[in-house]
Image (tube, grey):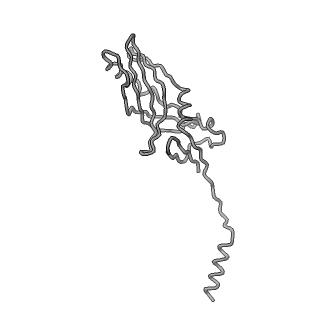
Amino acid sequence: MIRQTGFILGLWCLCMPVAFSQVENTFQLLKAKTINTNLAQQFPIDKSFQGNQATFSDAKILINTLDQSIKLQMTASANDKQQHLVATLVFTGKMLYDSFSESYVFDNLKLDGFIVEQDTYSDSLPVIKAIKQSLINDFEELILFNLGEINSLSPRRQADEIEISKDQLRLIWN
């Protein structure tokens, strides 16, 4: 008799509705192309330092699924009379949320790669050194994207989690 009562009680528990609230996650997919479009609006940037003139352009985000990293790549070019230098620069940094602008910014940039693509200078070392030294503080807080501009329905706060996948980020709010 005890088994039957337990069995009936078990069936009763399965049939009764459970009274708990389940909160659904909100998420926003953000493609690298969208971020690159926003970066393009902030470039080119002309800088003058130590007697050298340089233009920084073609900024784009690099999303790496293997090491789960986000990097920033741009082109630096310098011209002086008939001399010309073009280099590709890659930066590491942190993607941080700025609550004032409701935007994600790329902060604490560190030069990760500097590849000279073209060089017609007789001595390009001073130009390269000046470009590298100028980057310490000049590209702080580049805006990657503004939450309100990508989706008017997305929450206006920092995402609880960011997943990195091929050519896109998934922002998740709990």
Between 94 and 171, the residue placed more toward the observer is 171
Q: Position of residue 171 (x, y in %)?
A: 56, 45
Asked if 48 appears above or below 11 in the picture, the reply is: above
Q: Residue reaching furthest bottom?
A: 1
Asked if 139 appears above or below 7 in the picture, the reply is: above
* Left or right: residue 34 compared with residue 20: left
Q: Position of residue 123 (x, y in %)?
A: 30, 16
Query: In the image, what residue occupies the spot 48% across and 27% down?
Result: 58
Figure quadrant of residue 86? top left
Query: In the image, what residue occupies the spot 35% across and 22% down?
Result: 128
Query: In the image, what residue occupies the spot 62% across and 82% down?
Result: 6
Between 118 and 53, the residue placed more toward the observer is 118
* Left or right: residue 18 compared with residue 133: right
Q: Position of residue 26 (x, y in %)?
A: 61, 49
Asked if 1 appears above or below 59 in the picture, the reply is: below
Report the label total: 0
Between 19 and 59, the residue placed more toward the observer is 59
Query: In the image, what residue occupies the spot 56% across and 43% down?
Result: 158
Figure quadrant of residue 29? top right
Quarter of the image with the N terminus is bottom right
* Left or right: residue 167 compared with residue 150: left
Asked if 22 appears above or below 102 in the picture, the reply is: below
Q: Position of residue 74 (x, y in %)?
A: 45, 28
